[in-house]
Amino acid sequence: MSEVRSELRYLASHEWARAFRRFRPEVAAQRFAPRPMIVLHGDDDESVPVSDARRIATAHGSPEMSVLRGAGHRLRHDPRAVAVLLGWLERVRDE
């Protein structure tokens, strides 16, 4: 456990960690608009609440949003998320 704590202290001391703490996803989403954006989220995510994803979507104004039932934080391992993303990419490409 002490190894984990020392690793966390090390990571937190670096500039990228400070920049990460300053990052505001809602502001980034506003700046990204009106370009197409998709927000994918699992309703069983224990790391980030669905309400955060909804705030990002609202800040953008017109993203496609998909909340996957029973999915957790690691959506790249969920074939449903991959299917949603690929479908979105095809639609955006064809616009």
Image (cartoon, grey):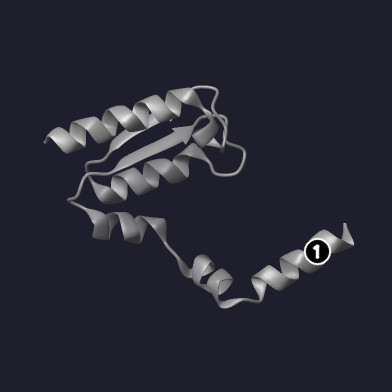
Instruction: Specify the quadrant that holds the C terminus.
Output: top left
**Rendering coords of residue 78 (x, y %):** 51, 27
Q: Residues within 10 Å of mark 1 (few under 14, many from 20)?
A: few
Amino acid beneath label 1: Arg
Q: How many marks?
A: 1
Q: Residue furthest left?
A: 95
Q: Residue at x 53, y 41 (%)?
A: 49
Query: On the picture, is 58 further left or further right than 16?
Result: left
Q: Residue at x 87, y 56 (%)?
A: 1
**Rendering coords of residue 82 (x, y %):** 42, 29
Q: Is residue 29 above or below residue 81?
A: below
Q: Is residue 82 above or below residue 55?
A: above
Query: On the picture, is 50 further left or further right than 5?
Result: left
Q: Residue at x 43, y 29 (%)?
A: 81
Q: Residue furthest right?
A: 2
Quick one: SS at disc 1?
helix
Tag 1 residue? 5
**Rendering coords of residue 59 (x, y %):** 30, 51
Q: Nearer the viewer, residue 37 or 53?
A: 37
Q: Nearer the viewer, residue 89 or 8?
A: 89
Q: Residue at x 53, y 67 (%)?
A: 21
